[in-house]
Image (cartoon, coloured by chain):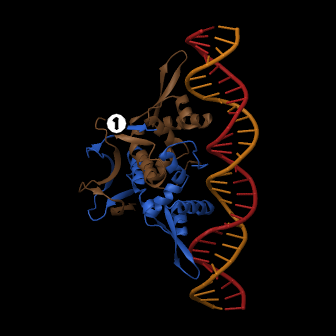
Chain colours: A blue, B brown, C red, D orange
Amino acid sequence: MLRHTYEGQDCNLARTLEVVGERWTLLIVRSALLGIKRFDGFLGNLDIARNVLTNRLTRLVEHGIMERVPYQDRPVRYEYQLTPAGRDLTRGIIALMQWGDRHLDHEQGPPRRADHIGCEGTVHVELHCGQCGRRVHDEEVDVRSIR
Amino acid sequence: MLRHTYEGQDCNLARTLEVVGERWTLLIVRSALLGIKRFDGFLGNLDIARNVLTNRLTRLVEHGIMERVPYQDRPVRYEYQLTPAGRDLTRGIIALMQWGDRHLDHEQGPPRRADHIGCEGTVHVELHCGQCGRRVHDEEVDVRSIR
DNA sequence: CCCTGCCGGTTTCGTGAAAGGACCAACGTG
DNA sequence: CACGTTGGTCCTTTCACGAAACCGGCAGGG
């Protein structure tokens, strides 16, 4: 994405996209979820231009999604770790990834899975009601503006 | 987003972002979830350039996320409706929106809510394990490549 | 002591997409 | 018959992206 400002949009989807909606950003976070931490790791994993990677990592750090921590001195080298806020994007990322699993790429099955550590089942994203506690389907959701 | 190709990425997040990751696209789908259907409706709701809106709607139709249906003849007028695949983006959109609710905009509370129709509770996005059925937290998820 | 390689960047530059605004066409209405 | 409504197209300017070259600190080898 581009021109990362959606001003005049009183909407937290717009605000979120200003932070993670630029091209490559969510893919960088996904790579981080896979365990990649270093500049060259992201480079090799993503086939992204170096300057763009620098730019995105800087922005992710600015927004508190990643943290730049030295892992050696002499010479000082940094790696990038997800913060709790960054890991909190897991749901959104898996939701989009599994949407792709369902609607695109029917050739050879999904290339990536989200497993429940310990139990080894596959993790899915679901909507649940905070009131009645039941699972909710797409058609039972009313998205609405307040204000 | 831009140059909408992440080739060489055997990843369904990348494929999904090629479809809905361009600037404005997810906001258009969100507006559609709010009930907006017409060209001028999106224009008024989003403050987007007309040519960009035309481009995005065309792409959404191409990808089977929206459908362009005439709602009157003479003159023929079209409106854009979400397909089931489009409505299936609900989880991803709410996940990102509520990430924004949690981590951005601490001023006046979230401007949009997702309600459970009938029950009037608020809907949340959760991770659940397909095996053991339990709710899963971010740290219990292992995202991994197969292949 | 110089050469090479590794790592994590910065700089420069050309290109193509987005923003913004003017224009357009078909029809209905007063 | 002018004017508004709807759903666009066209043109120009701006700016983000991609590619590639360059950089700097350090270790190890000959």
Residue nearest the viewer, comparing A5 with A34: A5
In the picture, measured across the screen, residue C13 lies left or right of residue A97, that is right
What's the residue type where badge 1 is placed?
Glu
Q: Position of residue D3 (x, y in %)?
A: 66, 16
Q: Is residue C4 above or below residue B91?
A: below
Residue pictured at 61% horizontal, 34% vertical: B50
Q: Is residue A90 above or below residue B123?
A: below
Q: Position of residue D28 (x, y in %)?
A: 57, 88
The answer to which image quadrant residue A140 occupies is: top left
Residue pictured at 49% horizontal, 34% vertical: B61
Q: Is residue C23 above or below residue A121?
A: above
The answer to which image quadrant residue A104 occupies is: top left
| Residue B145 visible somewhere in the drawing | no
| Residue B30 visible somewhere in the drawing | yes
Q: Position of residue B139 (x, y in %)?
A: 35, 63
Q: Position of residue B45 (x, y in %)?
A: 53, 35
Residue pictured at 60% horizontal, 59% vertical: A52
Q: Which residue is mark 1?
A: A139
Residue nearest the viewer, comparing B114 with B62: B114
Identify the residue at the far front of this view: B108
Q: Residues within 10 Å of mark 1 (few under 14, many from 20)?
A: few
